[in-house]
């Protein structure tokens, strides 16, 4: 393989690596009882020291909301058509809220304040979605001021708020003492809720910092094994090229052959991945040297070693200078001249100059190969690094989700990306002072490994669904739109796009798609705590939905319910693994105190049937097929299948191989 072909392979590999978003780990760690007791005592103390001066100002939040609402109104009026402007304002639907806020005594009247709170919560939900336009700065700012308004209403009564916060902190202290050494998903969600309360009310921010430190580790990790890197780079080299040189006054003409291998090694690093690319090759040449009337027939054998360190991250590739060594040994096969005396003199002189000539030749060989190697690796690493978050970033903004913090690195066996999917008021994976992580060790052979902590799902989903009422149609639309960079708006469920023309802008007056008359769509009130269940414990994965009300048509279940399915990692005959559901979808009522009515029992059966397809009997049972058009020979057209699935201590670890 030529060095040029090698450079193309290297470039493709680097492009693929810099497109990864998203590691070495250690065993599970426990949260000791003595530590939990100490933290609980701090919360008990904090409950007695509520500082009312830190509560958000109701009037201040009102003024900021009205200011940002007017800014959004002016922007939409000036930057879109009249029809689309009307559609946007109808979608925002804040006229009643604004009218109430213009009443000077609105915050003092309990009934008006509750109305403001309800309207503000509903507006916040409308400003969170996947429709294009919701990422506009004026709308994200309106969403933030809406959240501030909710907090202002929530804490408007200082005395009452102080009492409620103190009670919640005392109850939380009891909960901390009762938590297990390895906190459950519900425990972490409860801690997250408490952090949200403390931040919103401005209380005991030092305790918030402590909790974040203990539950602030990366909760996603992607690893690409060294074997994948090597399969893309490691190749043989076999090149022949003419020799045209002049050393110590002797003109040299001949042919040189370079044969060897290009290899890659991954080395430990933090902040970027380190890849050492090397070429070890033997050089053989057969040359004729001309010096005056004398002709020298020579053969040479040499060895060249070239290496270069590449640092890879999302911004691209940074290459260190090439390091190369070369050695050369030449032998004179014959000396051509008609006079024997001249031949003897030439032989003696050649022997005297041989060491110096070999040093010069070796240096020129080193310089030439270094230059070519540098050119090829520069060419391979000079591409414009793709932004792995480019398509995802607008969607995150629309959904009010923070862009994950990411850290690149490498060990002596893989390249990894760690990510922390958590907003400022959310927690991520737990840790201990003596240990950097509770993430399980990834063992065995793999090409790519993915590790996801339970907090990822809760951090992504709770801000969108917690406490929200959604119909079946709205849920389906949210799911279908979430994976697209330009979601297709649907009537009455998505905001009109600020980017649309008047002809193709959304009409909010269109009818919704007809539902099946025999099976009316359902409606669910999602729970405020962990609306989506995702638990990875004891080699079992639990998926589900939590709600506080479920209705379909005229039937209604107005109590807490949990719809779940359990999956077990199962090894198949071909050695691959998949997740197989154990039993049927379960519908439980954690707080039920009396028997269900006949109508409610029928609705429970309907729920089980509805969600049987939502939670299929098998997951991860199909190979992951890489399109043949992918410009990386090592993976193009290949199938990857799960080699292992591990679920423990809140982590799911999936490894795949070709």
Image: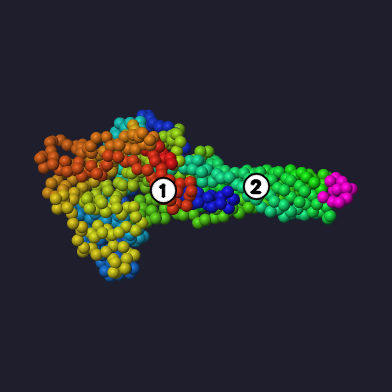
Percent coordinates x, y for residue 326 in the rendering = 69, 45
Q: Can residue 14 be seen in this view?
A: no
Stretch of the chain drawn in magenta: 336-349
Q: Is residue 550 left or right of residue 506?
A: left
Q: Mark 2 points at which residue?
A: 258
| Magenta stretch holds residue 36 | no
Secondary element type, mark 2: strand
Q: Give the mark nearest the N terminus, 2 or 1.
A: 2
Q: How far apart are marks 2 and 1 (CA)?
A: 35 Å
Residue at the disc numbered 1: 626
By secondary structure, the bulk of the magenta-drawn segment is best described as helix
Compared across the picture, whether 150 is left or right of 256 comes to left
The colour mode here is rainbow
The location of residue 252, given as percent across then percent down, is 75, 53
Question: How far across and down, in percent of the image, does residue 647 sit?
Answer: 36, 35
Image quadrant where residue 98 sits: bottom left
> Which disc number belongs to residue 29?
none
Q: Is mark 1 on a helix, strand or loop?
A: loop
- Check the picture and name the quadrant holding the C terminus: top left
Q: How crowded is mark 1: few (under 14 residues within 10 Å), some or many (20 or more)?
A: few
Q: Is residue 476 left or right of residue 249?
A: left
């Amino acid at each position: 393989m030529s060095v040029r072909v090698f450079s193309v392979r290297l470039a493709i590999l680097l492009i693929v690596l810099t497109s990864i978003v998203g590691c070495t780990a250690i065993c599970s760690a426990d949260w000791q009882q003595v530590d939990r007791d100490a933290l609980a005592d701090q919360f008990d103390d904090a409950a007695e020291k509520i500082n009312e001066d830190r509560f958000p100002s109701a009037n201040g939040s009102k003024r900021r909301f009205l200011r940002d609402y007017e800014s959004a109104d002016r922007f939409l009026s000036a930057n879109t058509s009249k029809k689309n402007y009307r559609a946007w304002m109808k979608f925002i639907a804040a006229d009643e809220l604004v009218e109430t806020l213009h009443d000077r005594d609105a915050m003092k009247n309990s009934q008006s304040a509750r109305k403001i709170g309800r309207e503000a919560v509903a507006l916040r939900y409308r400003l969170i979605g996947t429709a294009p336009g919701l990422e506009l700065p004026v709308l994200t700012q309106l969403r933030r001021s809406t959240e501030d308004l909710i907090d202002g209403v929530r804490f408007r009564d200082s005395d009452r708020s102080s009492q409620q916060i103190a009670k919640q902190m005392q109850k939380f202290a009891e909960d901390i003492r009762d938590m297990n050494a390895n906190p459950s998903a519900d425990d972490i969600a409860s801690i997250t809720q408490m952090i949200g309360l403390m931040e919103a009310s401005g209380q005991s921010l030092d305790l918030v910092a402590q909790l974040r430190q203990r539950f602030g580790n990366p909760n996603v990790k992607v690893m690409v094994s060294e074997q994948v890197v090597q399969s893309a780079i490691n190749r043989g080299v076999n090149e022949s090229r003419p020799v045209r040189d002049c050393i110590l006054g002797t003109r040299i003409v001949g042919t040189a052959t370079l044969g060897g291998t290009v290899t890659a090694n991954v080395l430990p690093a933090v902040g970027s991945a380190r890849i050492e690319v090397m070429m070890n090759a033997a050089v053989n040449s057969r040359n004729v040297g001309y010096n005056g009337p004398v002709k020298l027939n020579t053969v040479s054998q040499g060895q060249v070693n070239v290496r270069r360190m590449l640092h890879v991250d999302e911004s691209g590739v940074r290459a260190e200078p090439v390091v190369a060594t070369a050695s050369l040994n030449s032998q004179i096969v014959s000396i051509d001249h008609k006079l024997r005396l001249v031949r003897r003199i030439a032989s003696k002189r050649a022997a005297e100059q041989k060491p110096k000539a070999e040093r010069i030749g070796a240096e020129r060989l080193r310089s030439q190969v270094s230059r070519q190697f540098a050119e090829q690796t520069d060419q391979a690493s000079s591409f414009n690094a793709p932004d792995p978050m480019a398509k995802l970033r607008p969607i995150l903004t629309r959904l009010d989700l923070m862009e994950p913090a990411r850290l690149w690195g490498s060990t002596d066996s893989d390249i990894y990306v760690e990510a922390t999917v958590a907003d400022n008021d959310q927690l991520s994976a737990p840790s201990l002072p003596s240990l950097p992580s509770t993430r399980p060790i990834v063992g065995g052979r793999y090409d790519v490994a993915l590790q996801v902590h339970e907090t990822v799902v809760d951090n992504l989903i709770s801000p969108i669904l917690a406490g929200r009422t959604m119909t079946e149609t709205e849920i389906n639309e949210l799911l279908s739109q979430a994976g697209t960079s330009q979601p297709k708006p649907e009537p009455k469920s998505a905001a009109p796009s600020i980017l649309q023309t008047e002809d193709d802008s959304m009409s909010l007056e269109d009818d919704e798609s007809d539902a099946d008359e025999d099976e009316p769509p359902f409606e669910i009130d999602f729970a405020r705590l962990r609306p989506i269940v995702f638990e990875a414990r004891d080699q079992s994965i639990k998926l589900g939905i939590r709600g506080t009300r479920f209705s379909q048509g005229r039937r209604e279940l107005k109590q807490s319910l949990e719809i779940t399915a359990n999956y077990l990692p199962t090894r198949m005959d071909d050695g691959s693994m998949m997740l197989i559901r154990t039993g049927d979808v379960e519908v439980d009522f954690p707080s039920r105190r009396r028997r269900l009515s006949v109508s409610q029992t029928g609705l429970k059966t309907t729920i089980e049937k509805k969600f049987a397809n939502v939670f299929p009997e098998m997951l991860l049972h199909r190979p992951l097929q890489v399109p043949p058009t992918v410009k990386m020979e090592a993976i193009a057209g290949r199938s990857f299948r799960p080699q292992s699935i591990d679920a423990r201590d809140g982590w799911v670890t999936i490894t795949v191989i070709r």
